[in-house]
Image (spheres, rainbow, N blue to C red):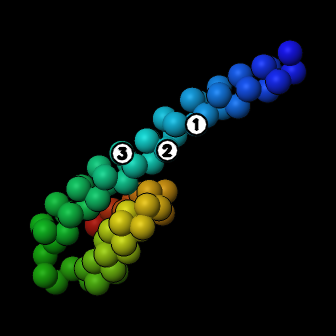
Amino acid sequence: MKRTALACLFMSAAVLASPVFAADNDLCTSKLQELEAKVNALPATSTNAPEIKRLLASAKTSKAAGDDKKCATEAIQALALTN
């Protein structure tokens, strides 16, 4: 009985945790796309351009490494600098 209850508990935790990881991936992807569009539209005289481009490159590296949470965080930071 205890084994069954524990097995059900672990299976429930795995099922509930899956959407969280998918959400990080989706957020990373959407924020990267938004950031790339804004970087392409940045004026050449923008004072924040080097930092924004550095954060964009770092976010892409994080995504390639599978760290979607860091990717999303860096992309959001860069987007804040574009405004």
Query: In which quadrant will I find the C terminus?
Result: bottom left
Q: Residues within 10 Å of mark 1 (few under 14, many from 20)?
A: few
Front residue (pair 61, 73): 61
| Three-letter amino acid code of the residue under disc 3 | Asp
The answer to which image quadrant residue 15 occupies is top right
Secondary element under disc 1, as helix, strand or loop, is: helix
Q: Which residue is mark 3?
A: 26
Answer yes or no: do the residues labelled 1 and 2 have beta carbons within 8 Å?
A: yes
Dot 2: element: helix
Q: Position of residue 50 (x, y in %)?
A: 28, 84
Q: Does 67 appear above or below 17?
A: below
Mark 1 or mark 3: whose residue is earlier in sequence? 1
Dot 1 amino acid type: Ala
Residue that mark 2 sits on:
21
Is disc 3 surrounded by few (<14), some (14 to 19) or many (20+) residues within 10 Å?
some
Q: Pinpoint residue 3: horizontal percent, then vertical percent.
A: 82, 24
- Quadrant of the snapshot with the N terminus: top right
Q: Residue at x 36, y 66 (%)?
A: 64
Residue displayed at 28% across by 77% down = 53
Q: Callout 2, which amino acid?
A: Phe
Query: Label 1 vs label 2: CA separation?
Result: 7 Å
- Residue at mark 1: 17
Q: Is residue 13 left or right of residue 52?
A: right
As measured in the structure, the alpha-carbon distance from the residue carrying label 1 to the one carrying label 3 is: 15 Å
- Give percent across and percent down for residue 8: 71, 22
Q: Is residue 27 visible?
A: yes
Nearer to the camera, 11 or 57: 11
